Image (cartoon, helix red, strand yellow):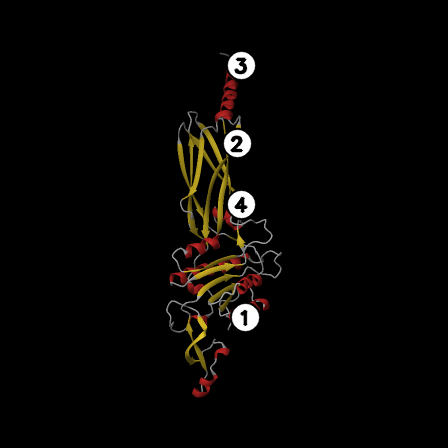
Amino acid sequence: MNLAWLIVILLLVIFGQGIMYSKWGLKGISYTRDFTKKTVYEGDTIEMVDQIENKKLLPIPWIRLESKMSAHLLNEEANENGGEIFHRSLFSLLPYQKITRTHQLLAAKRGYYPLEIVSVTTGDTVGFTEVFDSIQASTALTVYPKIISLDDIPLPSHSWLGDLIVKRWIIEDPFITAGVREYQNGDPLNQINWKATARSQTLQINQKDYTADHNLMIYVNFDTNEDIRLPIEDESLIEKGLSYAASLAAYTIKEGIPTGFGCNGYFVEPFTNVLERIKSSVRVEPSSSTQQVDYILDTIAKLKIDRSRNFRAFLDEDIQSERTDTDYIIFTPKLTETMQTKIAILEQNGNAVEVVLLDAEREEGVSHAS
């Protein structure tokens, strides 16, 4: 056989196998992916499992899978810039072979991470032809906010001093007086008992009892500026507030305190319609059930860093609903005069309010005295 015939036969083989792979290359290919856990905490590592199977006699010399994935899941270098990048996997499949591959991912940031479509590409052995298709491989990972020590939350110090008459509570009830004690640095001046001071000749302050049947609501204010049309200036500050809120809720619920959560943000898709002009505010009603911690963590994980309304309007919802017998802890980047007015109304309605400023330059929050 001369060289010319050899070249012709070779070209026919290449052309024939190219047609064969373009027609049947993706036939009988199945692909699934999932995470070994559906929920993790920020900073945890997680495994994503790919499983691809060739359900036909024709071997697949190569097949490439590509899908968009948040950079916050891939590695420390990539997640610094956020956004989405392509995650690629390359396989080679024998007839009727199934391959399982595990990828180590890093849950670097709180959030909800859905994975949907995977682009599949295959071709012949010499790269003569390539065929493309898309496979629906839906799964999702929910990353809870980081839980930190209670000592690392800049709560107002005066709310945590003294023996607790009711062991399971943490905030002084401004409406119950259990006696008097000697004044200490940091005590609010409006709680000084002048009659007792005159009798003892030393400053005496009203000793408050502690709430035994109130509910706790932990709020995070997303307002870094007054104009809701402007973007949030410092997202890391809001993320810090969410971590504080999650950590405090985990503690108080463990102690048996009915605890809820709220913020003036809204949920990411598909949990809210982002095209709606006015979105529902986020509010989890207080409970001390065993599922409440996970419910609050899941709620916080699925929040978008954006505002559904100003925080003053958010507080107005509690005022209009005539909420009472509730203790509030509000994590906020700023405390405006309007907020102080709304807080004063909440207190007049029979609630107690503590405000913690989210300020990187401050190590300790400030409280709003009744």
Within the image, what quadrant is residue 98 found in?
top left
Residue under pointer 3? 4
- Disc 3 crowd rating (10 Å Cα; few below 14, some 14-19, many 20+) is few
Cα–Cα span, label 3 and label 4: 51 Å
Q: Are marks 1 and 2 in contact (CB under 8 Å)?
A: no
Observer-side mark, 1 or 3, equals: 1
Mark positioned earlier in the residue sequence (2 or 4) = 4
Residue under pointer 2? 132
Closer-to-camera residue (128/146): 146
Q: Please state which amino acid type lies under the numbered disc 4.
A: Glu
Checking the image for residue 84, the label placed there is 4
Residue 171 is situated, as x and y percent measured from the top left of the image, at: 44, 69
Q: Is residue 221 visible?
A: yes
Image side of residue 85 versus residue 297, left or right: right
Mark positioned earlier in the residue sequence (1 or 3) = 3
Mark positioned earlier in the residue sequence (3 or 4) = 3
Cα–Cα span, label 1 and label 4: 44 Å
- Disc 2 crowd rating (10 Å Cα; few below 14, some 14-19, many 20+) is some
Q: Please state which amino acid type lies under the numbered disc 1.
A: Ala
Mark positioned earlier in the residue sequence (3 or 2) = 3
Q: Please state which amino acid type lies under the numbered disc 2.
A: Phe
Residue under pointer 1? 344
- Disc 1 crowd rating (10 Å Cα; few below 14, some 14-19, many 20+) is some
**x 52%, y 18%: residue:** 12
- Disc 4 crowd rating (10 Å Cα; few below 14, some 14-19, many 20+) is some
